[in-house]
Amino acid sequence: MTVTKRVAAGYLLVVIFTLTAIIYALASLHTQTTRSEKLVSVDFNALNLSRNLRQNLLTQDRLEKQLLILKDVEIQALLNFRQEEADALWKDLAALPLEIDFVAISEVMANYQEERLRGNGYLKAQAWQEAERFSRQTLAPLRSSIIDQFDALIEQQENTIDNSLVAFSADSSRAYQVAVILTFMGLFLSGPVALTVILSIHRSIKKLVQATHAIAAGSFDHQPDIHAKDEFGDLAREFAAMAVKLRELEQVRLDANPLTHLPGGLSIERELEARVRMGKSFAHLYLDLDHFKPFGDRYGYKTGSDVIAFVGDVINDTVRQEGTPEDLVGHIGGDDYVVITEPELAEPIAKKVIERFDREVPRFYTEEDRRNGFFFGKDRFGIERQFPILTLSIAIICSNNLESPSSLAISRECANIKDHLKKMPGSNYLINRRRNL
């Protein structure tokens, strides 16, 4: 029975006082839930972004000093990557609805980004003396100023979170006290019924407050120990559902590939299992670059990373145009990608991806290699031989062609098709049209 029904079974006056207590408690819990969600999604997120951005700036300072000493292009590529990462972190931080003044740090950050472009120009031109002087006189002081401001910002955010937690606890205590007082007034009229309601509310509020603190602290596995089929049980289940969602979002964020920002192996495995469990037909596209290692050996880490990101963009754009909102584009790692879509959309997507890939990938080569259509490099055995322009192999597995669809069965079929595709010249796709046991 719900709290309302149990109170209604007693005396009318007990109903009035107890319902008043429940309404107040639920309103307070709703306010606390909203505040806890803001604490998790805004304040804690802002604190993490600020710390990461501060660490990124320190890393930029270290890499810049190393680059000016060693003059190594790989260090310059790492520096560029860190700068892009800092811009993304700053964009995410500035987008958060924080209750603090961002004007001063925004102005300094904008000035730093503008001056950084000038410094990058010196580095790109390999004007090392000018770059060293510009770094010492302009960039380093600016960066130091920003770091100091972030130190103050982090301290302010930590104080804000501490104050929110203190206020959160005080509001919880106040809500509890008011609910107890109102319920105690009804206790004189119906002792046993009122006592049961009071104890139920007390235990529920205490456990929900504990759950809120635990979830706000990042313990997403915490489950409120409330199993009653009443309002508090529903709220406890909502807390549990919110914690599961937050944990899933955190796992997705950690699982995403840092280069393409596409979901990784964990998300792909979860999507496959969900579709198999629902018995829904789907197509699994496994995309793999051919001859990527020799290409990376010839053109270096930066160009190889650019190609990896380019392929991810091509696949993602094509699926958005040709697929459905429920489709998944994933990046297993390296030069391996996965698309999960409807069976009838698999072939059009594969054709469009190959068409755009073959048209645009030559721009990553030198004019000489594009004109020749190949380059010389060493294979995995250290033997020098001729390698063609990068091609793409796409193995397509349809679940309705498998007797018992599973991740293992799909992986096995993909491996067989991929081995066959690797022996064929150019970019190709192949669908398993035969029915497998």
Image: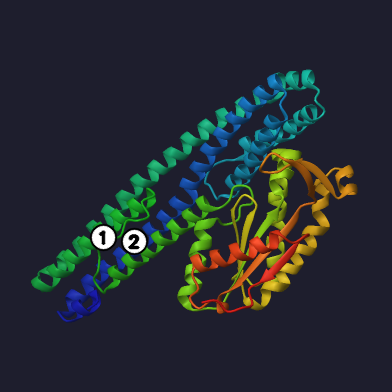
Query: Is 100 placed above or below 155 here?
Result: below
Q: What is the three-letter code of the residue carrying label 1?
A: Ile
Badge 1, how many Cα within 10 Å: few under 14, some, many 20+?
many
Amino acid type, mark 2: Leu
The percent position of residue 214, horizontal first and vertical second, equals 33, 51
x%, y% of residue 108? 66, 33
Seen in the image, is 273 located left or right of residue 175? right
Quadrant for residue 18, please give it. Answer: bottom left
Q: Is residue 329 above or below residue 346?
A: above
Q: What residue is rendered at 20% in x and 65% in y?
A: 182
**Relative depth, front residue between 286 and 326:** 286
Q: Residue at x 34, y 50 (%)?
A: 168
Say above or below: 268 vs 12: above
Residue at image position (79%, 53%) is: 361
Q: Nearer the viewer, residue 65 or 106?
A: 65
User: What secondary structure is marked by label 1?
Assistant: helix
Residue identifier under label 1: 205
Where's residue 26, x and y in %? 32, 66
- Left or right: 133, with 145 as reference point: right
Using the image as rendered, state which of residue 62 and residue 338 is in the foreground.
338
Q: Are marks 2 and 1 in contact (CB under 8 Å)?
A: yes
For mark 2, give the secondary structure.
helix
Which badge, 2 or 1, is on the more N-terminal residue?
2
From the viewer's side, name the closer residue of 397 and 3: 397
Residue position marked by numbered label 2 in the rendering: 29
Task: Report, in whole angstroms, how far the alpha carbon at label 2 lies from the one at label 1.
Answer: 8 Å
Which corner quadrant of the image does residue 316 belong to?
Answer: bottom right
Label disc, if present, on residue 141 of the rendered structure: none
Quadrant of image for the N terminus: bottom left
